[in-house]
Image: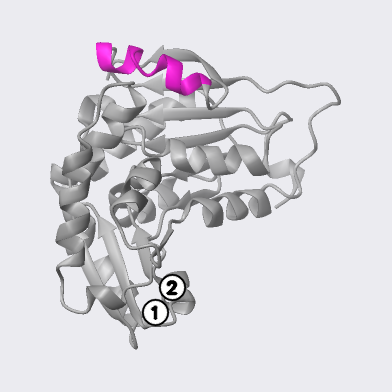
């Protein structure tokens, strides 16, 4: 990639998700590229994605991404949602000229990391059932036992946590217990958090799981990929302070309640598309 393919600096990064789970990815990107302005976009009007039909979801993501790029021209798009990534990336790449990075469940690194050959996969029910996920397991974890569990409840709990609401720790414990009741679960030493919401609950999950289980996600790998794709872009001017913004597709009380949590990500502005 050359500078001619991108707009003038500062190079802007657009991170897109259905909810706030993608903030776990945005955090990793900010740590690697602290000088780049970032737009965090949440399609909260259509949340959650896991319950929507495939054709409906592809059309919706196309509509929202198009409007986002029109209002906030960006140099790279990160689709920080497993459901959207597995369904919409081919369509988005066929019509957009900017680099696009999607989220893939970290099954390959988990299989390489495991010493027992038993790994866990914690995702939304849609991601667990998706043929794309099954293909990843066949390709990269052939010699591993993969224990999969789908949970929509954890998505809602992560959203509640970021809004500053009291969360149901017992529910997290029940989900962890359900995972550990599977055959050979006592040998599990790596657990893939295959929904971008779940790293936001990493500490709470760890409290209810055996100490030997290492929790991994795709956030760091995505950030490295973004850094690589932007490597040839000009550096921001000395003294430049990037401005980050959170954009929601619907103005709601819940979105407004995220303001304190967003400041922890250096995001002090909120805007609404209302689509």
Q: Which residues are magenta?
A: 253-263
Q: Quadrant of residue 75?
A: top right
Q: Is residue 255 a member of the stretch shown in magenta?
A: yes
| Residue 137 located left or right of residue 182 | right
* Magenta span includes 91: no
Please, which residue is most extreme toward the bottom here?
Answer: 143
Instruction: Return the residue nearer the eye: 173 or 156.
Output: 173
Q: Give the quadrant of the C terminus.
A: top left
Q: Is residue 128 rendered to the left or right of residue 24?
A: left
**Secondary structure under the numbered disc 1 in the rendered image:** helix
Q: Residue at x 26, y 74 (%)?
A: 186
Residue shown at the point (32%, 29%) measured from the top left: 161
Residue 95, can we see it?
yes
What is the number of the mark on residue 108? 2
Total tally of numbered discs in the picture: 2
The x and y percentages for residue 241 are 73, 20
Instruction: In this rendered view, identify the residue nearer to me: 258 or 238.
Output: 258
Q: Position of residue 39 (x, y in %)?
A: 51, 27
Q: Are marks 2 and 1 in contact (CB under 8 Å)?
A: yes
Residue 74 is tagged as none
Quadrant location of residue 21?
top left
Reading the image, the residue beneath label 1 is 140
Secondary element type, mark 2 = helix
């Amino acid at each position: 990639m050359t500078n001619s393919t991108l707009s003038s600096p500062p190079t802007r990064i657009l991170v897109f998700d259905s909810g706030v789970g993608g903030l776990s990815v945005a955090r990793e990107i900010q740590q690697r590229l602290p000088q780049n302005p970032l737009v965090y976009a949440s399609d909260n009007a259509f949340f959650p994605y896991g319950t929507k039909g495939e054709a409906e979801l592809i059309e919706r993501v196309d509509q929202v991404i198009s409007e986002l790029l029109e209002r906030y021209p960006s140099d790279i798009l990160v689709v920080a949602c497993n459901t959207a990534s597995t369904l919409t990336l081919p369509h988005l790449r066929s019509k957009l000229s900017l680099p696009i990075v999607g989220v893939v469940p970290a099954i390959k690194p988990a299989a390489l990391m495991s010493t027992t050959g038993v790994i866990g996969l914690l995702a939304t029910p849609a991601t667990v059932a998706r043929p794309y996920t099954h293909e990843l397991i066949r390709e990269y974890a052939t010699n591993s036992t993969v224990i999969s569990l789908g949970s929509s409840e954890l998505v809602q709990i992560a959203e509640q946590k970021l809004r500053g609401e009291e969360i149901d720790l017992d529910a997290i414990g029940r989900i962890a217990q359900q995972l550990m009741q599977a055959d050979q679960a006592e040998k599990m030493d790596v657990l893939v958090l295959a929904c971008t919401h779940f790293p936001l609950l990493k500490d709470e999950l760890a409290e209810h799981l055996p100490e030997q289980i290492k929790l991994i996600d795709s956030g760091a790998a995505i950030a490295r990929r973004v850094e690589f794709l932007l490597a040839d872009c000009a550096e921001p001017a000395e003294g430049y302070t990037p401005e980050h913004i959170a954009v929601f597709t619907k103005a709601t009380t819940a979105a407004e309640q995220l303001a304190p949590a967003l400041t922890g990500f250096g995001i002090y502005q909120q805007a609404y598309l209302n689509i």
